[in-house]
Amino acid sequence: MRYLPLRIFRQCVARYQGDHRIKQFKCLDQFRCMAFAQLTYRESLRDIQACLRALHPKLYHMGIRGRVSKSTLADANEKRDWRIYADLAQVLITHARRLYAQEDFGVELSHTVYALNATTIDLCLSLFPWARFRQTKGAVKMHTLLNLRGNIPEFIHLSDGKMADVQVLDLLIPEPGSFYLMDRGYLDFARLYHLHQAHAFFVTRAKRGFNFTRRYSHEIDKSTGLQCDQTIVLTGFYPAKKYPEVLRRVRYYDEESDTRFVFLTNQFDLPALTIAQLYKARWQVELFFKWIKPHLRIKAFYGTSENAVKTQIWIAVCVYLLVAIIKKELHLEQSLYTILQVFSVTLFEKTPILQVFSETQSQTETRSSHSQLTLFD
């Protein structure tokens, strides 16, 4: 909690009057209790209450004051504006982005590279009637723009399950000179042309059967898996009106998956193989979703209202960002998974974070030095 920017947090609270007429259980207490729930994998509000009351003599170590009540926490999640924690997340994103600005993501490129995708979180329609997705099913979508340098989520939009993935492009403010990696679900030529006009670059997959005319063909090295590198123009009536300028079409064969990919981009200076490598790096956003769903509490919720669900998701994002910031500022070599596991059992210890992980590292090295503990050579 020492890495939480308290002054800015209080500004976010004041912006939405989160502590208006609140005397005891303020937004900071709510955040700390929900962060505790995220870091220790609590299952319910009753679970949170029982654990925090059992640790009552140690609560001040984490900054929690007073007895924590299940009903009080439920009311806070129900009524305190979720935008408080969304704004806090944006501040933490800015901080984390500076820390990870030079992080390598597998492609030699100096530009900022984003991967855009969405994941669906299933909900029970009878408990979450506001989140109607299908006739008998509820869901919310988490649209995420992931900065591949450090896997930092730069933009998150929570919507109902009905919102089409491509519509989130209308909410983005394109960053000139940056790359946006998207699958073919985001192939909308009018929206892509908007990115192009903003001097941003995109790499996406082409859909089958789209009409185009080849203007030029460029030399390629077929031993790398490349099959063609072309400059094209769209010939369909509506696509040509929506995107009137030339595009680059790169076809690539991946031996590992025995799949042919056709990429479309508005970047003509990079080698064609780099375009293929960039799209392959887009998979990191899929891995990000696969990582946060089991390791953060965003699949089972402590409240059923829209405000409670969004509050929980945004606090989960804040916790993820805080751990990423701690990892970088303390130069920890452990993975985020390991750090979260250690935090889950040491939250109320007085031992400094750096000391905990230095001891963990030395113990690991000591164990690995004993050959009798090795099962396989």
Image (tube, rainbow, N blue to C red):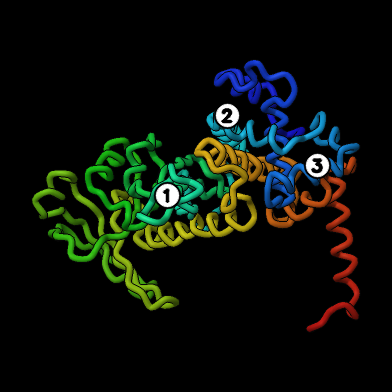
Three-letter amino acid code of the residue under disc 1:
Leu
Query: SS at mark 2?
Result: helix
Q: Amino acid at mark 3?
A: Leu
Q: Position of residue 235 (x, y in %)?
A: 10, 55
Quadrant of the drawing holding the C terminus = bottom right
Q: Position of residue 244 (x, y in %)?
A: 15, 44
Q: Is residue 108 visible?
A: no
Q: CA distance from mark 2 to mark 1?
A: 31 Å
Find out whether the residues at labels 3 and 2 contact each other: C-beta distance under 8 Å: no
Secondary structure beneath label 3: helix
Foreground of the two, 92 or 64: 64
Q: Residues within 10 Å of mark 2 (few under 14, many from 20)?
A: few
Which sits in the foreground, 164 or 373? 164
The amino acid type, in three-letter code, at marker 2 is Lys
Residue 194 in picture, x, y percent from top left: 27, 39
Q: Is residue 61 visible?
A: yes
Residue 21 position (above or below residue 287)? above
Q: Which residue is mark 3?
A: 52
How many residues crowd around disc 3 within 10 Å: few (fewer than 14), some, or many (20 or more)?
many
**Residue reaching furthest front?**
126
- Asked whether, in this view, residue 240 is left or right of residue 173, the answer is left
Please tell me which of labels 3 and 1 falls first in the chain: 3
Disc 3 versus disc 1: nearer the observer: 3
Asked whether the residues under the numbered discs 3 and 1 touch, taking CB atoms below 8 Å apart as contact, a structural biologist would say: no
Q: Residue at x 31, y 59 (%)?
A: 205
Check disc 1 and report the residue beneath it.
116
Residue, disc 2: 79
| Outermost residue to the top | 21
What is the distance, in whole Å, between disc 3 and disc 2 at their CAs? 22 Å
User: Where is residue 50, by image quadrant?
Assistant: top right
- Return the residue nearer the eye: 334 or 106: 334
SS for callout 1: strand
